Image: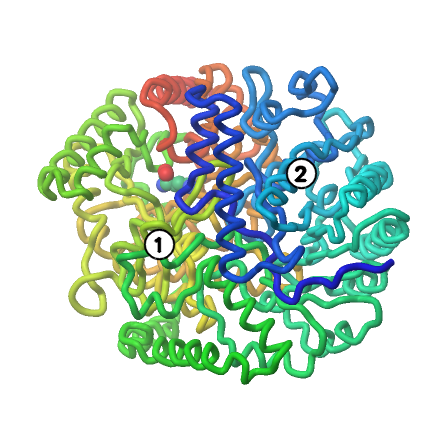
Amino acid sequence: MSVQNFPAATIVGYPRIGRHRELKKAVEAFWKGTANRSELDAQVAEVQKVNLARLTELGLNADYAIPASFSHYDQVLDTLRLVNAVPSRFADALDERGILPLEGYFDLARGTQDQPALEMTKWFDTNYHYLVPEVGAQTSFELNPEELFAQLDIAKEQGVRVRPQIVGPITFLALAKAEDGTAPDFEPLSRLDDLLAVYEELLTQLTERGMQWVQFDEPALVADHQHIDAARLSELVSSTYGRLSAHSRRPALFVTSPYGDLAQNLEPLAQSGIEALHVDSVSADYSDRLQQLAEQNGLHLVVGAVSGRNIWRTDLRQTLKELEGLKGISIATSTSLQHVPHDLNLEESLREDLKSWLAFADQKVVEVLTLARAVLEGEDAVAAEIATASDALAQREKSEGVRVQAIRERVQEVTAQSGAFERPTTSERQQAQAFLNLPQIPTTTIGSFPQTSDIRKQRAAFRAGTITESEFDGFLREEIASVIALQEEIGLDVLVHGEAERNDMVQYFAENFEGFDTTVHGWVQSYGSRCTRPSILWGDVKRSGEGLEGSAFTVPWISYADSLTEKPVKGMLTGPVTILAWSFVRDDQPRVETAHQVALALADEIADLEKAGIKIIQVDEPALRELLPLRAAEQPEYLKWSVGSFRLATSQVADSTQIHTHLCYSEFNEVFEAIDGLNADVTSIEAARSRLELLEDLPATFDRGIGPGVWDIHSPRVPSVEKIRSLLEQAVDSVAPDHLWSNPDCGLKTRGYEETRASLVNLVEATRAVREQV
Ligand code: GLN
Ligand code: ZN
């Protein structure tokens, strides 16, 4: 096969949301019905054209250097649509040709009147969520390339030859779950042969369109999977890519492996007959294996040397040193750039020095081009760029606030103390906490109450300066008073202040800590049209304000709430692991050091809450599972430092202070270790959707408080008294009534007041009924 050379510089993928979140606005207007289909089509075409123009202007203008990575919602859903693998419960979403149209695609993503959406879960160890395909023994696969071809056509009109980018067949099935009603031992990967027939047809059709390259993303090959044997996975790699490369009419195959190390899958993939292989040399240390790959005949090596998932400027000198001696390679990003914001130049108010240490998607494209030039022409050709990068990094290292000796000494001192991570036994603590006088199966909520449009308007007005700080404060106090009154009226046992003052559970802390900065346009897609704006954790962390301990910032709100009621009010904090997971974290020291600093800042806030008389303090860790390494061998080390940092934050309290935590997921076997490790007095977890099955695995010795969510707050439905009651009755079978709590699955900020009130009234009534039975 004679193919056009692979471009010297490329990216694995590019943000899809648009420089000013145009995609969000376009699809949300379409969903609301305020824009029609042709308006939507025009807007998404425009997003793609602007991106193509930008990338070519930056210099990514060789044929096939740009992947067709646009998505209306999610790349896994795109691939589902491309192979028309529509779950049978969504048969209604198909059009008269039996093909999934865009409207049906959104139905799968968002659910319909009678079908809940596809499940959503984290994409590898990132904060991006994909939709989980449901594959059964009868799922039919059929090529539906309309959307892919539409993207190629838009690029062609612009005069750009892009390369199709598709989730690879192994990853697609490895991420799928078995459709409901399939045999218990059925696994989606058993359908690989059938799926490959469609990929072959796709290759044929791409060839007919004159495509020279196609990209298949296979991140599943860098992870361990609970249900897939590693040796079998390697065999599937050989057979799959052996088969696709034996297909007679096809473009050259480019396979990417972002997020980690291919390990035992490297050899089979490299030998399978594909033309180009991408490895992630940022997440993994490939060292000498790179040389071997670069020398392999017939295989073109594409080194992902620029991080696609952090926002730090690349150390060009150091990277080139690692690439030394590698001839004929191409340079790429380590992952898709979908995990970073579009363009640093949009940040007009970020400090200039901080800005010089950073690179967002567009700056990373330039870094890739620079490294590629150095590989082709030698380092001298880019001497000026190397010098600029090295200067910025040298300046970063010695810049004020990056390393604060006093903070470091304090962390060292505290973590070295015996007992820094320990509390007395759970039963001693329970005795000390008995004064709280809580009823059996206490009722509570997870923290936030509905973030009404009124709250958002007032916050915007305060930001814009149209209301004063004291006006905004007054508004928030009224809000707190009404949330407390509502909870008293409903009859909840442990109250919350409602979190109205917080824009976001991490950014709020970033704004009150030193060592963080926030951006204005730094949006990153979380899922579909949802975007988050991670804060930048660049320096040593302590609370803002005088001295090493800084000053309290949640205390005024919590104390005010506490003053309005006789019932206990929970203090509410975000945990260290979640603060790290949902920020862009400095890359110049091990994460454990950063986590310990954040933990101590939180411990300071907890101490102040205690001083203010707050008896119950909740420290949320919804992201604990998210950072779990993809390889099983690396997981114990992670759990050690993540759980350790939570304990560092929460262990210095009085025995009588009740520490709560909240975890946002339901794979209980995976969380159990963490629940025990965190050593909290009470843990609330997501459970309503899994029908509390998770509690069945609870060991008989379990002696902590546990609040399995009995109201699925992800759905607007109000759970009935009977429904909640039956969940609690089921829970009482596995959990002693003295340890059981009754609460929703998660915070209520996305819910409306009407459903919130109705649901909580039912929750209290159901709990009282069960209380009487036990
Ligand atoms: N306390 C937070 C809230 O109630 C927890 C949010 C979360 O778990 N993601 O909103
Ligand atoms: Zn949650």
For the point 81% across and 36% down, which residue is it?
185
Q: Please tell me how crowded label 2 is: few (under 14), some (14-19), or many (20+) other residues with Cα within 10 Å.
A: many
Figure check: 482 above or below 49: above
Q: Quadrant of ligand 1?
A: top left
Residue at the location (20% across, 31% down)? 479
Q: Earlier in the sequence, mark 1 or mark 2?
A: 2
Q: Quadrant of residue 274?
A: bottom right
The residue depicted at 26 percent of the width and 37 percent of the height is 500
What percent of the width, then of the height, locates residue 642?
48, 59
Compared across the picture, whether 244 is left or right of 666 comes to right
Q: Is residue 531 above or below residue 91?
A: below
**Residue 552 image offset from top left, x and y in percent:** 20, 55
- The front one of 350 and 738 is 350
Image-based side of 418 in relation to 295, left or right: left
Residue 338 image point, x, y percent: 52, 51
Real-space Cα separation, disc 1 to disc 2, in angstroms: 30 Å
- Percent x, y of residue 385: 46, 77
| Colour theme | rainbow
Q: In front: 650, or 57?
A: 57
Q: Is residue 725 left or right of residue 290?
A: left
What secondary structure is found at the residue carrying circle 1?
Answer: helix
Query: In terms of secondary structure, where does tag 2 sit?
Result: helix
User: Is residue 425 among what the camera can see?
Assistant: no
Residue holding disc 1: 346
Residue 503 found in image quarter: top left
The residue that disc 2 covers is 148
Q: Amino acid at mark 2?
A: Leu
Quadrant showing the N terminus: bottom right
Residue type at the position of mark 1: Leu
